[in-house]
Every structure is written in structure tokens, then in C-alpha cells.
Image (cartoon, coloured by chain):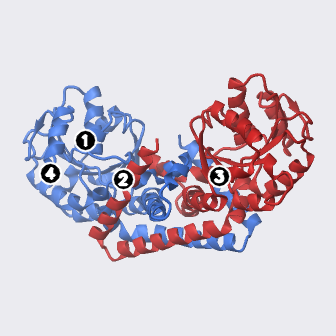
Chain colours: A red, B blue
Amino acid sequence: MKKIHLIGLGLLGGSFSLALRKVMPEITFTGFDANTKHMEDARTLGIIDEASEEIPEDADVVILATPVDTLEDLLVKSLEQIKENTLVIDFGSTKNALCQTVANHPKRSQYLAGHPIAGTEYSGPKAAKEDLLEKKVFIICEMEKTDVHLKGMAYDIFEALNMKLRFMDPEEHDRQLAFVSHLSHISSFMLGKTVLDKMEDDRNIFDMAGSGFASTVRLAKSSPGMWAPIMKANKENILESLDAYITNLQEFRNKISEEQTSALHSEMTDINKIGEILDLGK
Amino acid sequence: MKKIHLIGLGLLGGSFSLALRKVMPEITFTGFDANTKHMEDARTLGIIDEASEEIPEDADVVILATPVDTLEDLLVKSLEQIKENTLVIDFGSTKNALCQTVANHPKRSQYLAGHPIAGTEYSGPKAAKEDLLEKKVFIICEMEKTDVHLKGMAYDIFEALNMKLRFMDPEEHDRQLAFVSHLSHISSFMLGKTVLDKMEDDRNIFDMAGSGFASTVRLAKSSPGMWAPIMKANKENILESLDAYITNLQEFRNKISEEQTSALHSEMTDINKIGEILDLGK
């Protein structure tokens, strides 16, 4: 492996390059970002060696790390451009539509559908961190459809990055991610909105906010350019998770209204077990 | 100031004592907790020097750090027991009902209505940390009703603890806290419930959860014994905040359903400013 071409030089693409360059310094990174400032920053920060709008002919791997609404076109275009020994990997947060788009593509075996479960509420190359992917889960969908030789190259990369590989069906991926990622972003954005609206009356409300509020509302700082497209791409699953969440809130609201203190107590006790489950995963 | 009596030896009471003992080592701490194990732990951990069910006659300050449903009775009982130079301070998360209960009490001037904006998702004396209160806000309600001399003692304590004093009307306190604290606990509990319910189908769902989910759901580990009573005590304000939150979620849901991607984008961009506002408060 000598050359990797990165399309999308933001938080994920940037962190991927910074981490991989540490353990595989022999690799040359080229890259492109539609945002000129991001491309300059990526060069300054050492995320890429050279800017290139085209995929270099000798690229071994092409990484697509752009918002999900751009990925379908970009994936098809990239597959058309690459030579037979090049692998394309995407980092998109939704996988089903993408896998369907290229299901019958003649170069399907040169594509690996991936999703690193890592991120922060910040975006752009300046937010990139060389330890962002360390020990995080990397989900691969439809791994059997990728060429064995090319897939080996991907495994080398993700093992070098110390990531934990998981294999899933793309539909299952999108359904699960709606619940454990997309929903919590929406709950956080709406919590932020509710308190911002309230601030119209109480200018000093944030002075009263503790670390609990800050933690719960943290994801409301996330990039709209990344998240609006996810809400379209994974619409059905997100609506299912959001409807379940709203129903739970309404039922809990009614218990508060009726002062069912012991029912509230026992419900919260049941939910407390999420702490143990999350700690287990550490 | 020679002696402080603590009623409630959990996270807040314990952290208060550990921090104050560092800067005012001359003070003796006595204390009581209805939970016998907590009382033993508090002694072992150095939170109190001596267990005492009664308020010692020579206590300068009595701190009430128990769940809000116990505070009204406890406050009235404590005021009846103390001598004229003793101050009672409570740490309850709601203030209005408590201030009303003692509004015409003959010893009203020996009470200071307080609320330290600090906590973690854990509870009990073992969760106490000597830096929990450091640089946090301490809200005082109806400060004009407390005796000047006794209030001076309270200021000495909270300044020694390096806390930032804020003064508020108790009704305003309860209204604001519903939005910046109580609502985020409920949103977090219900997010936890929604994902736990989903886990019935997908056993491995938590493997896919990233740090964003963990942060948003963190408060779902909080103590039901503390939170169920808050939901009763601050019912009207919590219902107002919860209804606003549910309405925002439903409107956002409908935009997702109608694929109003640019409206979602612009709404999230507006909410992003919460990041700057929260950072300002640091």
C-alpha cells in the first residue's frame, strides 16, 4: 500500500489520515474537499501531502468521507474512475441506500461499505484528532461482496488503527444506528431549542445550567451539513425511533401530571440498568 | 464556626464536607443519614467525625441534603430544635414550596434557602468528591429573609468553597431549573428507555453506541430516589418544559417526514449557537 486518496477532509477523514500516518508513515496521502479552506487546512495540518481533484491512477485505496447526501454519486463516479486494484471505502453514517445503489455495479467487488463509530460535536479538518478512531468500532456491511484481496488491505488498515471490526447487514445497521446515534442527536438538538426558546424570557438561564445539561445538549453543536442529509437518508428508521421516544415522553409526562411518584421511581430504576450495560461495553 | 451538622450524607452532603474540611480543618462535622450503611461509609470516608441523630446544641450550621420530598418536614423540625445562633441551610433542587412552608415561621430568619448547581449521575457517600462544588454556582433564594449575622457565616462557607453565589426568587429558580436541569434528566431517562426497549429485538445494539450516545444518556443513571420527588415538587414547571420539548420534537419529526432538508439544516444551524453560549459560561 503506497497511496491513499481521501475525498472529504473533515473530522473523520482528517482523523483517519493523522492516525494512519503515525503507524504507516510510508503511505502518501492525496485528497480533495469541495471546501477550499478545508483543503488548505488539511495540507497545513499534514492530513494530505498533495491536493488532487482526480483520483490518482496509482491510488491503492480511496476513502469517501463526505456527508451522506453526496455519497451515492461520489461512489458511482469513483468506481468508474478507478483501476482494477483500487479499493473504495466510504465512511457514511447510513449504509442501506448506498449498498442498494451499487448492488449490481460491475465494480461492486471494489467497494467496501464502512462506518467508523466515532465523532465529536465538531467538524472540519481542524477538529481532526489522531486518537479519534483508536479502539472504536468499525462496521462493515456486506463484506462478502468485496474482493478478498482488496478486503485484506482494508483489514490491514483498520487493524493498524486499532479499531474493532463488526459485520452487519446494511438494513440492520441503519435501524440500529437510528436508535443509538441519530435519535440522540435529535433529542439533543430539540433540548437545545427548548432551552434557547425559554431564554427569550430568562436571559440568564444558562448561568444555572450544570454539567448534566451540558452533557445532554452537547450533540446540539453538531454539523447541520452532516446531519440534515442523514435524516433524509435514514428517514423511516429515524421516524420509528423518534415516535417511540415521543410516546415514552408522553407517557412519562402523564405519570408526572398524575403524581404517580412510585411508578416514576420504579420506571427510572429499570432504566438505571443502562449504566451497567454501557459500562460493560467499555 | 466550630461545628456543622449534616443531615443527608450522600453525594452533595458528602462532597460539601470533604471540600470544607480541607480549607476549614478546625470544624467538627456531625451527621445523620436514614440509610445506616451510608452513615457508616460517611464515617469511614471522613465525611463526618461522629454520627448523631439529634442536632447537637452547639451546632453553628445545620445542612439539609436529603431528597426534596423529605425537606419540608425536616426543615420545620430542625428550626424547632435549634438555638438562636444556629443557621439551617438546605441544598434542595426545588425552592418554592420550601420557602412558602416556612414563610411565616417564627425562626424564618435562621434559614437560608440554597441550591448548589453540582452533581453527577452517581449517589451516596462513596460518590462524594472534594472538588464537586469547586467553582460551581450556589443559588440563594430570598436572601433578605435570613438574619444578617447568620448569612455572613454562610457566605464565609461558600466563599471558602470557591463557589459562585447567585440570588434568585424561588419561583424563578424552580421555573429555570425545570428547563436547564429537570428536563434534561427526563430527556435522558426516556432516551435510555427507548433504546433499552429496542434492545429486546437487537441484543447487540449497545455495541454500536458511540460516545455521543453515552453522553446524552448519562443522566439516565441518576438516582430515582432523588428525581421522583423533584418531579412532584416542581410538577407545573416540569410539565411546561416537557410539553415545549415534545412539541419541538413533533414539529422536527414532521419536517423529517416531509423531507424538508433545508428547513432542518437551518433549524439546526440556529440551535448550534447553544455551543457558544455554553462555552461563554465556562
- Local crowd at mark 2 within 10 Å, few (<14), some, or many (≥20)? many
Instruction: Give coordinates of residue A68: x percent, y percent.
Output: 75, 55
Identify which amino acid the numbered label 4 is placed on. Ala
Contact check, label 4 and label 3, Cβ < 8 Å:
no
Q: Which residue is mark 4?
A: B34
Of the image marks 2 and 3, the number of the one nearer the N terminus: 2
Of the image marks 4 and 1, the number of the one nearer the N terminus: 4
Q: Which residue is mark 3?
A: B273
Instruction: Give coordinates of residue B276: x percent, y percent.
Output: 62, 46
Label 4 vs label 2, nearer the camera: 2
Tell me, yes or no, whether dots 4 and 2 are on the same chain: yes
Question: Chain for mark 2?
Answer: B
Instruction: Give coordinates of residue B262: x percent, y percent.
Output: 76, 64
Contact check, label 2 and label 3, Cβ < 8 Å:
no
Q: Which residue is mark 1?
A: B125
Identify which amino acid the numbered label 1 is placed on. Pro
